[in-house]
């Protein structure tokens, strides 16, 4: 496929996304696991907890920060994340006439393992790579993404064809230069998968004091190995990861359940409201009350309280 044909496909995909996502924000589609997103302005950074996804932009550009690392991508690139990561994201190129447009697919680790089992030559190396990567879109990935989006115009085809095309798309990602991250996180017994157990415990026990001994035991690692592999996968220490997850969850509670700041802080494990306020302001830029008031003035789809809604 030449460059002109790739550009034509991107234009077709942009038209489909624009038609199904008319306002700034994110919309779920009739295809399970697929959503579209749109933005017509360059905004201040937003925050979200992004689970395992493939995200493909067809128009505009975006910058993502995980830990202290920054990743940029545009219509010629895709993003994959293999584990749940708290992220800051910022649209860096968008206008009303040429908005930021893209699509995302939630990645099911069960489907990844099924495909890996059918790819015996793709053995998982027991190393730990970063749980987020930016790759260059190739014709095969773009074509599969476009064919998935086209199904929205023939809804009767979705139950049969969507799983087939999704499987092809995941195969293309696994066979690509960043497929290793997906294989590592999904493969039982790998160092990455062992760290995922620690991540799962932290997410389920936000109100509990962090215990490196417990996390090391869950991961079947020594304390030093846990720290090394945890930071390799998430770009954060366990304590930094827990703090960001706690603050994200407190923000979500205040925004969507009318919980006050003190109650939200207690719910996620803060014993000191003043410490919560300091750390919240340091992370989100403003105190909790002012931040939530600002978010409520924006459109619901533009807020970032829902997990895995941004890409």
Image (tube, helix red, strand yellow):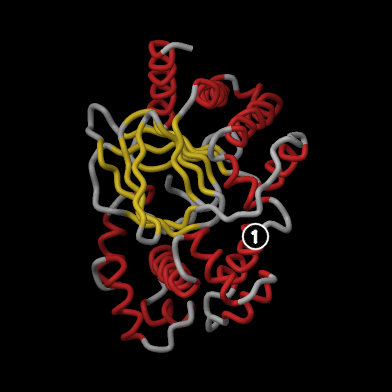
Q: Nearer the viewer, residue 59 or 18?
A: 59
**Residue 13: where, in percent of width, then height?**
44, 23
Q: Based on the displayed image, in which of its 4 quarters is residue 26 positioned?
A: top left
- Residue depicted at x 50% and y 53%: 130
User: Relative to residue 176, is residue 293 drawn left or right?
Assistant: left
Where is 148 relative to 286, above or below?
above
In this rendering, is residue 164 above or below 253?
A: above
Q: Position of residue 157 (x, y in %)?
A: 66, 22
Q: Write the residue at 28% across / 72% down.
A: 282
For this rendering, which residue is in front, 207 or 123? 123
Find residue 68 and report its image quarter.
Answer: bottom left
Question: Left or right: where does residue 185 sit relative to residue 178?
Answer: right
Task: Tell me if I can see residue 136 in this picture.
Answer: yes
- The residue at the far bottom in this view is 272
- Name the residue rendered at 50%, 20% in the picture: 139
**Numbered disc 1: secondary structure:** helix
On the question of residue 257 being in view, the answer is no
Residue pictured at 65% horizontal, 22% vertical = 156
Q: Which residue is mark 1?
A: 191
Estimate the x, y position of residue 54 in percent, counting from the top left: 52, 40
Which residue is nearer to you in this view: 32 or 128? 128
Quadrant holding the C terminus: top left
């Amino acid at each position: 496929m030449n460059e002109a044909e790739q550009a034509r496909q991107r234009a077709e995909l942009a038209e489909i996304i624009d038609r199904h996502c008319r306002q700034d924000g994110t919309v779920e589609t009739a295809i399970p696991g697929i959503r579209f997103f749109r933005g017509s302005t360059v905004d201040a950074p937003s925050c979200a907890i992004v689970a395992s996804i493939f995200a493909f932009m067809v128009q505009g550009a975006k910058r993502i920060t995980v830990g202290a690392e920054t990743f940029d991508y545009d219509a010629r690139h895709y993003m994959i994340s293999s584990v749940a990561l708290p992220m800051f994201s910022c649209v860096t190129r968008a206008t009303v006439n040429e908005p930021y447009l893209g699509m995302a697919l939630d990645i099911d680790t069960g489907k990844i393992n099924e495909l890996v089992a059918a790819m015996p030559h793709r053995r998982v190396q027991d190393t730990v790579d970063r749980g987020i990567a930016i790759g260059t879109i190739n014709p095969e990935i773009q074509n599969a993404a476009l064919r998935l989006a086209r199904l929205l115009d023939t809804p009767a085809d979705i139950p049969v064809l969507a799983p087939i095309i999704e499987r092809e798309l995941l195969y293309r990602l696994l066979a690509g230069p960043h497929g290793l991250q997906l294989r590592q996180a999904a493969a039982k017994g790998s160092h990455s998968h062992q760290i995922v157990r620690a991540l799962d415990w932290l997410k389920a026990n936000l109100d509990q004091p962090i215990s490196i001994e417990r996390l090391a035991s869950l991961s079947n690692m020594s304390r030093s190995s846990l720290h090394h592999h945890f930071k390799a996968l998430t770009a954060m220490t366990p304590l930094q990861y827990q703090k960001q997850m706690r603050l994200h969850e407190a923000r979500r509670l205040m925004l969507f359940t009318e919980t006050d700041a003190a109650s939200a802080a207690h719910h996620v494990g803060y014993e000191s409201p003043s410490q919560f306020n300091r750390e919240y302001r340091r992370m989100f830029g403003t105190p909790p009350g002012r931040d939530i008031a600002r978010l409520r003035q924006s459109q619901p789809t533009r807020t970032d309280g829902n997990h895995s809604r941004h890409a």
